[in-house]
Image (tube, rainbow, N blue to C red):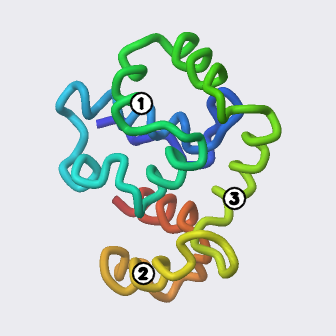
Amino acid sequence: MEPLPSPRTPFAGAVWLARILEKARRMNAGTLPAEYASRFGAANGTDGQFLGFFQFGPDQILAIAGRPDEEAAAWFLSQPAVTAARIIEWNHLAENLGREGFPMAERLPVALATTYAHLQGRDLQTLFEVIEADEEIC
């Protein structure tokens, strides 16, 4: 199966959007692996950070995922909480998720000790780094 887009891949200017859209497309098709499907849109995960920041829910992403990229981008950019300034703010926040002083900082050590124990010993300081390291191994 084709790998998911990197968390850093921008779509409509926003990182994570390409990834969550692809996850939604695979979820709709029944091809999203169980470990991703069980956490899709989870409020305490990166999906939840993205959705909460831009003030929409997983059902909206699942609904828009069936549309072509251009329509999905137009929909995203038309949302009330989506502005150029908010996208810049999100991109900075997202790149630092898990880092001390940013959201999810308390979760990163737990994730590295459990789910991502195979990555221990590497100097991974953000969730994006952990995801990319995990997926290059898998």
What separation in Å lies between label 1 and label 2 (alpha carbons)?
28 Å
Image quarter (top left, top right, bottom left or bottom right) of the N terminus: top left
The residue shown at (54%, 11%) is 71
Tell me where residue 74 appears, x and y as whole percent.
61, 15
Asked whether the residues under the numbered discs 1 and 2 touch, taking CB atoms below 8 Å apart as contact, a structural biologist would say: no
* Image mark for residue 112: 2
- Quadrant assignment, res 86: top right
User: What amino acid is at disc 3?
Assistant: Leu
Helix, strand or loop at label 2? It is: helix
Tell me where residue 127 appears, x and y as whole percent.
53, 66
The residue shown at (34%, 59%) is 138
Of callouts 3 and 2, which one flags the residue occurring earlier in the amino acid sequence? 3
In the depicted structure, whether residue 14 falls above or below residue 37 = above
The residue shown at (34%, 32%) is 59
Is 74 or 122 nearer to us in this picture? 74
* Image mark for residue 93: 3
Tell me where residue 18 appears, x and y as whole percent.
53, 34
In the depicted structure, whether residue 137 falls above or below residue 112 = above
Of callouts 1 and 2, which one flags the residue occurring earlier in the amino acid sequence? 1
What separation in Å lies between label 3 and label 2 (alpha carbons)?
20 Å
Question: Mark 1 sits on what residue?
Answer: 61
In the depicted structure, whether residue 10 falls above or below residue 113 = above
Of callouts 1 and 3, which one flags the residue occurring earlier in the amino acid sequence? 1
Tell me where residue 89 appears, x and y as whole percent.
76, 50
* Image mark for residue 95: none
